[in-house]
Amino acid sequence: MDDSAAPHPEQDPQNRPAPQRRQDQDADYPQHWEADILLRDGGTARIRPITPADAGRLVEFYEQVSEQSKYFRFFAPYPRLSDKDVRRFTHHDFVNRVGLAVVVRDHFIATVRYDRIDADGRPCETGTDAEVAFLVQDAHQGRGVASALLEHIAAVAQERGIRRFQAEVLPENRKMVKVFTDAGYTQHRSFADGVVHLEFDLEPTAASLAVMRAREHRAEARSVQRLLTPRSVAVLGVSRHPQTVGRAILRDLLGGLPHGDDRRVYAVNRNAPPGTELDGVPVHRSVLEIPGPVDLAVIAVPAAAVPAAVADCGAHGVQGLVVVTAGYAETGPEGRDRQRALVRQARAAGMRVIGPNAFGLINTDPELPLNASLAPVLPRRGGFGIFCQSGAIGVALLEAAHRRGLGVSSFASVGNRSDVSGNDFLQYWAEDPDTDVVLLYLESFGNPRKFTRIARRLAAVKPIVVVKGARHTGSLPPGHAVPVTASGLRDATVDALFEQAGVTRVETITELYDTGELLALQPLPPGDRIAVVGNSDSLGLLTHDACLSAGLRPRTPVDLTTAATGENFRIALDVALDDPAVDAVIAVAIPPIGTSAHAFMGGRLTGPDDPEMGSDDPEIAAALLEAGRRAGELGKPLMLAHLALTDLPTRLRPGGIPAYPAPERAVRALAHAVHYAQWRRRTAEAEETARVPELDRVDEGGARGLVEAALSTRTAIAARTQPGGARITLPEADTTALLARYGIDVSPTLPAPDEESAVRAAATLGYPVALKATAPHLRHRPDLGSVRLDLTGEPGLRRAHQELDALLGGAAQAELVVQRLAPRGVDTVIGATVDPAVGAILSFGLAGAPAELLGDVAHRLVPATDQDVAGLIREVRAAPLLFGWRGAEAVDTAALEELLLRVSRLVDDLPEVASVDLEPVVVAPHGLAILGARVRIAPLPVRSDLGPRAMSTL
């Protein structure tokens, strides 16, 4: 990839010297511009500003560039850089002149530079345009380097007030033209004097964001694929002692390779005498002594020896590391520093890291099997992709899969999750045709917002089932590095995140596999109408009741009696499956019971004269297998709930019929499948029909001006230095004005510090009125007697004022106000909060006890569509109160949905708005009234999820 820039390095486009800016560059060095990135092939690199100390690196880099690339860059032969060139390209003011480099193993592989220009193309310090130019070493072209650089230099330019880039490119430099045209920005192109002139706005567009996300997806998926499919593996830390970790991994690795596999496995022990072999593998003293390439290294040396081992791996060109060594962030602050240094060292050498403190990595692909883990046996091949953050849970997950006879496509237990995360594996599994269902055990989120985005795309085609630890404690396991913003993620927020992303959340490992097995083996249920068929009336009733408790719609169970034969089951199952009013079938079965020939022996119901009785009935198994084939053809799931039939599940396994030893387990799994299928249908429909409606009475520019003015006040500036952030609560008048810019009208209030003020306020607003306290300790507390309603005249108002003045310790202290009485209706509460880890969240509930005491609040991520808000108000358990419960008149839900859309639009348009609280919102049969409002604002962070691609630096 070549540069597109000014024709000569010593001159600007108008042959004028660039303006100089005097400053201490060390003090002004923009550290936050540094970022680790993933390239198209899955390798890593670092982007950072270029400084005067990089002169030698720049000269070395330029020497590695081909003559053609130099010609494309400067429009003329330019074999070497002069001292003046080197100074110009390494001395920047980081405002009007900025240079970034992509660095691998401390060597430049690409550079980019912009110079701020005025309308005539001359260097300046105030313009909003800049000329941009790139240069990529020929050996690294095609890796997506220039595309990543463009994202980062564009973000830097926007931060410095530049709104548009200009570039000049020779027509034959098609690769560079493609970088610009594929980026998705709004562009203008012209051709003159044999040069293509490009101009493009830097404001992100839907197209540019889509391009960025697609590139991110490909790079992260490829990086995981490289880890899972190495052609050569080295184990560092292999000891002569058979019980050591390194030796165990070597044995497990060798045991997972099929006979005749031509991949190379190496062992490394720095103290090994020459000629040493362990388990038939030659032992080298260093990775550097290995004669061939090494794709993956498993590091099991002591923590103190890890930096040297990583350095050797980087020098040898290793692509990825699995670090099983412990002693990092899980041990405390010093260990966390060692962990960060490990990640920086690996990424600088182009390597990704699983771990540290990892259990390992498994791939069951018969073409390239890999067991780089502490699991003694490679799992059987299957469709489950499994990710966890705990070695102990990883063992439990693999054991559970083996016990159930379920197969695994790939498995990762990443320990401290310092680099490669669940998000990376989700990207990979979205592309992997051999993964059908994703199972996750998560204890923390590194980037919840990104998880939501990736999981939503994946869940549209493959189920994701997750157990999230620390539901009630909210604590983080030792060693898990997460942003401060994500460390206190509320469980209700996690539920909203999962719900909107289509992720199925379960409570236990058992439920994880119960649900995953059903989703993997059976079709998604087309609805929630359930038939229950079996040979036990009691078990059928238990299943029926469990369905009702799970929100399903079961039919009356069909009891075939305990004397039912396989033929009876076959006929009954055929009838249930053929019924168009049935979406799924649960077969229930117990052992056939005779009148006197059976006894309880050894804890099992058996027949002494017939040892097969009590274990299962082959005829029933045959009937279920036949019904299973028909169920698959009809697209309806079939499952079995049984008691004491220990062999029947094994007979059903070839037919893919899940069998559960308790009805409630079967029903929970089916309820999850029904909910997930409904989400899939809603999502598919929403892509066609859901919309964010155009709203009238929206003045985004005016609202933005109000926010900017509020953030520039002396109070707001002072608040930025306070602990806990810089959220500023707007005064009531500013709150009302801001909301009005989005068509959100708050019922006005007038202060009533004394009786006469109250009377004048009522005369202004018009009777009937309400008198209420607004002091913080009394707000929304009618239970304390702080509100008087239905005041229709002056005498009643004066009497109410006297009562509250005496009850609440004075009208001034209570901050009494007068407000026009709202029409009768249902009191609700609407909120929008920006969670720095997840983004903006829209909330709805009924005011008072339902929301405050019972937590009956529903959430959606912003921006919300019309279908999102319709579902939001119907999701709370108290929703029937809105729709005419017990004969009451239904309220105006259309007005309520419109208000929710307006709040969503406001926080989406204005990222400086940190929270909006509307309480109460009284929804009447016709219209609604907002009686209270609070808005808090905060300055924007430096970077956001809309910024350029960058790997976590925790």
Image (tube, rainbow, N blue to C red):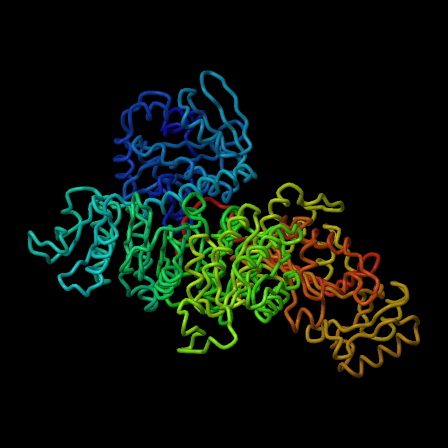
Q: Quadrant of the image for the C terminus? A: bottom left
Left or right: where does residue 87 sit relative to residue 241? right
Left or right, residue 740 beside residue 526: right
Residue 67 % position (x, y) = 29, 24
Work out which residue is located at the far top of the displayed protein and give it: 193
Residue shown at 72%/46% (left/top)?
698
Between residue 841 and residue 429, name the one nearer to us: 429
Residue 753 drawn at (x, y percent): 80, 73
Residue 527, position in %: x, y? Answer: 63, 53
Work out whether 381 lies above or below 124.
below
Figure check: 461 above or below 608: above
Q: Is residue 889 left or right of residue 567?
A: right
Count the marks.
Answer: 0
Q: Residue at x 74, y 64 (%)?
A: 880
Q: Nearer the viewer, residue 628 or 562?
A: 562
Residue, far left: 274
Residue 738 in which image quadrant: bottom right
Residue 59 visible in image: yes
Of residues 830 and 59, the one drawn nearer to the viewer in this rendering:
830
Is 165 in front, or is 525? 525
**483 lies above or below 186:** below
Residue at 69%, 49% (x, y): give it.
866
Q: Quadrant of residue 48?
A: top left
Q: What quarter of the picture does the N terminus occupy?
A: top left
Horizontal and vertical percent for residue 229?
Answer: 31, 45
The answer to whether one can see residue 712 in this image is: no
